[in-house]
Image (spheres, grey):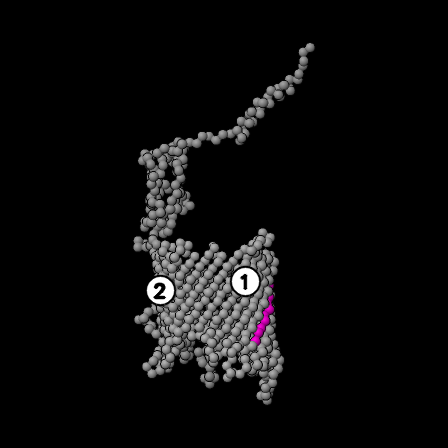
Amino acid sequence: MPSHRRPGKGCARAWFPVLFLTLWASSPLAAQAPPPQPPASGVAVTARTPEPGSLILERRPAITVTLEDPQAVLDPKSVAMEVDSADVTLFLKVAPGRVTYVPASDLTPGEHNVKFTAADKTGRAIEPVEWKFKIRRFAAFEEASIGGDLTASLERALRKPIKEPKDDSGVSKKTETPLHLFSGNLRVDGLLKEGDFTAKLNSNVRYVDEFRPRARPKSDKDKLDLANYLITFDRKPLNLEMGDLVVNEGFFGAPNLARRGLQFQANDMDDRGLKLTLFGTRYETIKGHHPFFGVEEDKESLLWGGALTWAPFANRDWLKLHSMNVQGHRFSTAPGANVGTVVSGEEGDLWSFGTTSILFGGRLKLATEVAFSEFDTDTTNEFKEESDKAYRGTIEGMHDVAMLLDSPVTVKLGAEYSYVGFRFRSPANPGLQPDREGYSLKKDTLWKIATLSLGFSAFNDNTDRLDLLPRVRTHSWNTALTLAPPDLPSLVLNYSRSLQRSYYEPEVFGPKRIDNFQNTYGFNTSYGREAWSVNLGGSVNFFHDETLTLQAGDKTTWTATAGMSLKPVQSLSISPSFNFNRIDDKDKVVFLRDNTQVRRRVYGDTLTGTLTLAQEFIPKILNLDIQVSGSSTQSSDDTVDSQTYGGVGRLTWNVGNLFWDWGKQALSLRMNFNRVKDHVIPQDRNEIGIFMIIDLLAPYKL
């Protein structure tokens, strides 16, 4: 008996493989990328103008791409070019073997970038090309510019806070507030560049003029002032500076010496490991319109010297040998300064030799220096120059000692020993303290959000062990803990202790004269959000004096500070602050009404509060700035009792270029208030001033 099957199932089984193969063939897994087309033949780019990296003077250069085959024809629809990211395809001139673009307007001086893509007539793309060239501003220099800004302010006193003093008051009439006050500042920045040569100018020229009635005396100050200037010429490895410069050579020699003068450096540290520095400056800080220096200009105030640094190893940080010499003198020619035929003043000479080493990737640093000086502090006396020496050595190191919560715990250690002789002086380091010997130690432990600092130092004077002078020893201990967790208040806790005593007192001085110690505890915390911040701080200092000859001097000083900054809306900011200081003098000498002296405990309190407010009524157009403050000082023995109040308010209208088409202008109305009230010496002084101000800001570029 023949079997009977349903036709539907058989058809489904028969069509299933066909359907599966059809879907597989059309799926991404079975798809194959077409074979890559060979590069377009004869259309490779062989030349570009302006040439890559070239420096040209032409402002509208023909930007050209030349093909390998002079007869090659490109697909016009595929040709594209960008100049400084701007599409210029529509302006291209496409010819066999060449594509050209000529800018319709001048290109700006500086660097320009060109991108070009195309394909041949068969659609095969050529290799895209991209190159850069520069247009110089002038024929003589690659870059040349001068610019800056002019700021000026004219202030008219509608109401003077300080009136003209009376003739019999004994007060100089120069204290009177001027009717008009004009001040201006011209900032000039210049640049010249050609290849590896660069010249720069940075300067500020100020002008201040007080308009007073003809009968009033004028100010003694110069109206025109060359506030600062610096001219720099640089062509590696040479560098020359003229003007207000900074010399930084050695610790005893000339560290961070800011003077007006000249400095020349030849820095060939990379190749030969040598660096030479020569400098000549004024002996003292000079202000005003004295632009240069030199023996011809001022023979009375000169400072000059030089330094040589040599790094003998391939790794220049391993060892640097440093030597320097600096000499200088300052002679006074003012009336009364001369004694007979001798001019008063001082002069000196210093030699310094030192080494520095940086090892293990900066984890260990060593430095040494020894210096010898000859110095005469007074050229009028019969004593000649006195010589002395100074030396120091430092070591610093750091090491990761452990891991805590996936963050390293780093320890930094440092130590220093220094000796500065009793007669040691440096003409280029007037702030160096002579007659001092001692050492200091420090340790910092850092981890993620915490820093623990420990320090100790011990110093003494009378380094020459002179019998006529005592020796004073000072020991100091300090520690500080800083916590700065993210999104939480920061906290700083600190403690310090110092001990000072004198030894080897000469018999003529009697018992020891110095014996005291003090302890200081302090803290500070701050926390802030986007619209507000707050900070609190405080400290207390306990000073105890056991000096026998004084029999007094114990004091306790308390200090508390608080501040806040609020920005309730975008246009308003408010910043109040408060400070309190109390001095508790345990045993102070007090004069009674009958002029008798007694010892009493006296408190002295000072309270100070400040409020700053800034309100923008119209953003960047109309704004108000106010700052008010008040302070009160009183003592329990009634010798001090005074209050001071002050305030400044300024309403400013930024009018833009309303009056002139050049720069920006602003009109302001300012009010000053100051009141001083003294209850011990009865007086109550009020000063109120109202001023109309015109401000100008005018940037320029040539």
Q: Quadrant of residue 205?
A: bottom left
Q: Locate the C terminus by quadrant.
A: bottom left
Mark number, residue 205: none
Q: Quadrant of residue 597?
A: bottom right
Within 10 Å of the Cα at label 2, are there few (<14), some (14-19), or many (20+) other Cα atoms? some
Q: Main secondary structure of the magenta part?
A: strand
Residue appearing at x 47%, y 84% in the figure: 169
Element type where label 1 sits in the image: strand
Amino acid residing under circle 2: Leu
Residue displayed at 54% across by 73% down:
646
Q: Which residue is mark 1?
A: 443
- Label 2's element? strand
Q: Nearer the viewer, residue 525 or 248?
A: 248
Type of the residue with mark 1: Lys
The residue under the point 50% across, 78% down is: 470
- What residue sits 42% from the left and 54% below the top? 315
Q: CA distance from mark 2 to mark 1?
A: 38 Å
Look at the image and say whether residue 304 sits in the magenta stretch. no
Location of mark 2 (residue): 278
- Image coords of residue 78 (percent x, y): 40, 36
Percent coordinates x, y for residue 329 in the rendering: 36, 73
Q: Which residues are magenta?
A: 516-527
